[in-house]
Amino acid sequence: MTPEIQCISQGIYKSIPTEDVVGCHRRSQSMLVWAIDGASTLSASPFTTFGDISDAGWFARKISDAIPKLATPSFSTSRLHRQLHTIRREYFDASSETNPMHDWPVAAATVVEIATVSPARLLVSIHRYADCFELFHEGRTASNPDHGVPARLIQTFDEWKPHSGFAGSELSQLRSRRCQQQRNEFGSALTLNPVSAFNAKRIELTLNTPAQILVGTDGLSRAWDTYGLMTKAEALKLAAESGLGALLNAVRCHEASLAHRADRKRRDDASGILLSFD
């Protein structure tokens, strides 16, 4: 199993590492790919527990680092459940258990496991938590003369604001929701509550090769689910033909033309991993 792989991850703050992580783990007859999106920090400072990374960014990286260890012989929510116990202890040791619950980290994630059934057939198993995404296409994509030359990424930085820019009733509602998530009373995200490991929406499907698989975070999926710039199929086609940078640039160009809305961040960290199977 030797697909062509493209990765992209772009944060929006100059001095704050992105809270997204994408990754890939190869095995002899299968592989795992994943995207993890740490939820926007709601504290007054971006660095509340760790000196150089937000709690959400730390949490996303801890989950990402653990995924290869959770995948023998295949990805297991029960092993993730045990790992979240360990991550929870590490977080409370680092924070001295002084952070309020609404500041505890939360993450969306999609973990996609791909196994070779035959030279021309793939078995795909998906575990999705909250609003990360996965897209699939069977068949070849058109040849683009610019493919293989990475698009020059549009990169401008936002100023981080206390509570990630949220205020008033919007901030109160988000904090209340985060507490519900930590009690596993709301939504399907991963949290410091180990029971959240079992929140995954599970999907299985088969793909005939050639095929493309795109996994990413909601900063990238804004292209279709927030801005309506294109359909999911068009987004995957653009990424497969012209590279992930072309898809991200379409999002960033559109965002540059918008007036800021108080009910959401002007932009978001955006990450994806694209696999092309010939």
Image (cartoon, helix red, strand yellow):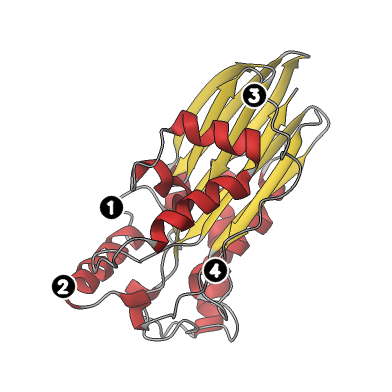
Please identify, in this view, whether the residue under mark 3 or under mark 2 is nearer the observer: 3
The residue that label 3 is drawn on is 141
4 or 2: tag closer to the N-terminus:
4
> 83 or 30: nearer the eye?
30
Task: Count how many numbered circles sit on residues in the image.
Answer: 4
The amino acid type of the residue labelled 1 equals Phe
Taking the image as shown, residue 191 lies to the left or right of residue 237, namely left
Taking the image as shown, residue 102 lies to the left or right of residue 154, namely left
1 or 3: tag closer to the N-terminus:
3
The amino acid type of the residue labelled 2 equals Ser
In the displayed structure, 230 sits above or below 190; it is: above
Q: Report helix, strand or loop for mark 1.
A: loop
The residue that label 2 is drawn on is 169
How far apart marks 1 and 2 lie (CA) works out to 19 Å
The residue that label 4 is drawn on is 57
Pointer 1 and pointer 2: residues touching (CB < 8 Å)? Answer: no
In the displayed structure, 158 sits above or below 96; it is: above
Pointer 4 and pointer 1: residues touching (CB < 8 Å)? Answer: no
Q: Quadrant of the N terminus?
A: top right
Expressed as whole percent of the image width and height from the top left, the position of residue 253 reads 46, 56
How far apart marks 4 and 2 lie (CA) works out to 25 Å
